[in-house]
Image (cartoon, rainbow, N blue to C red):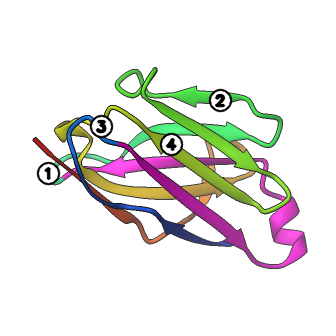
């Protein structure tokens, strides 16, 4: 596992934008084992859901609810993943978690989460 530190959450009005960042750190052995990173979110009373994922070769996957509004990107040299969130809606309110792993369907490292609140 690696350590993941998220930043960029906060309070924004509907229609606004936020950019989340997540930096991975750890031993070189652990870092080079990461082939995919992603973002999940969990709203109160709901299950955690995948928002978007990306591989080191830039293959992306998005939840239908965020397609066209969110963009995930990765800086391989910095082991950092970003989530640009535009046209935010109140239903995007949740704690957003960064994840990393060998494959996008087997994340084994998780960040502590960052709160995103969208007011109407």
Camera-near label (4 vs 2) is: 4
Res 104 quadrant in image? top right
- Marks 2 and 3 in Cβ contact (< 8 Å): no
x%, y% of residue 29? 89, 71
Point out which mark residue 88 bears.
Answer: 3
Q: CA distance from mark 4 to mark 2?
A: 14 Å
Label whose residue precedes the other's in the sequence (4 or 2): 2
> Dot 2: what SS?
strand
Report the residue marked by disc 4: 84
> Dot 3: what SS?
loop
x%, y% of residue 23? 65, 66
Q: CA distance from mark 4 to mark 3?
A: 10 Å
Q: CA distance from mark 2 to mark 3?
A: 20 Å
Label whose residue precedes the other's in the sequence (1 or 3): 1
> Dot 1: what SS?
loop
Q: Find the magenta span and give its range.
A: 17-43
> Dot 4: what SS?
strand
In percent of the image, x 82 and y 69: which residue is there? 30
> From this viewpoint, is residue 104 visible?
no
- On-image quarter of the C terminus: top left
Report the residue marked by disc 1: 45
In percent of the image, x 39 and y 55: which residue is there? 96
Res 21 quadrant in image? bottom right
Residues 13 and 24: in front is 13
Residue 84 in the figure: left or right of residue 106: left
Residue 33 lies in magenta, yes or no? yes
């Amino acid at each position: 596992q690696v350590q993941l530190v998220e930043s960029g959450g906060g309070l924004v009005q509907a229609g606004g934008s936020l950019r989340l960042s997540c930096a991975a750190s750890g031993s070189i052995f652990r870092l080079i084992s990461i082939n995919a990173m992603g973002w999940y979110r969990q709203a109160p009373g709901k299950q955690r859901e995948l928002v978007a994922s990306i591989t080191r070769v830039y293959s992306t996957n998005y939840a239908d609810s965020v397609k066209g509004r969110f963009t995930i990107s990765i800086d391989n040299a910095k082991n950092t993943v970003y989530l640009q969130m535009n046209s935010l809606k109140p239903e995007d309110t949740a704690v957003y978690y960064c994840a990393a792993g060998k494959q996008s369907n087997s994340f084994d490292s998780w960040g502590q989460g960052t709160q995103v609140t969208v007011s109407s």
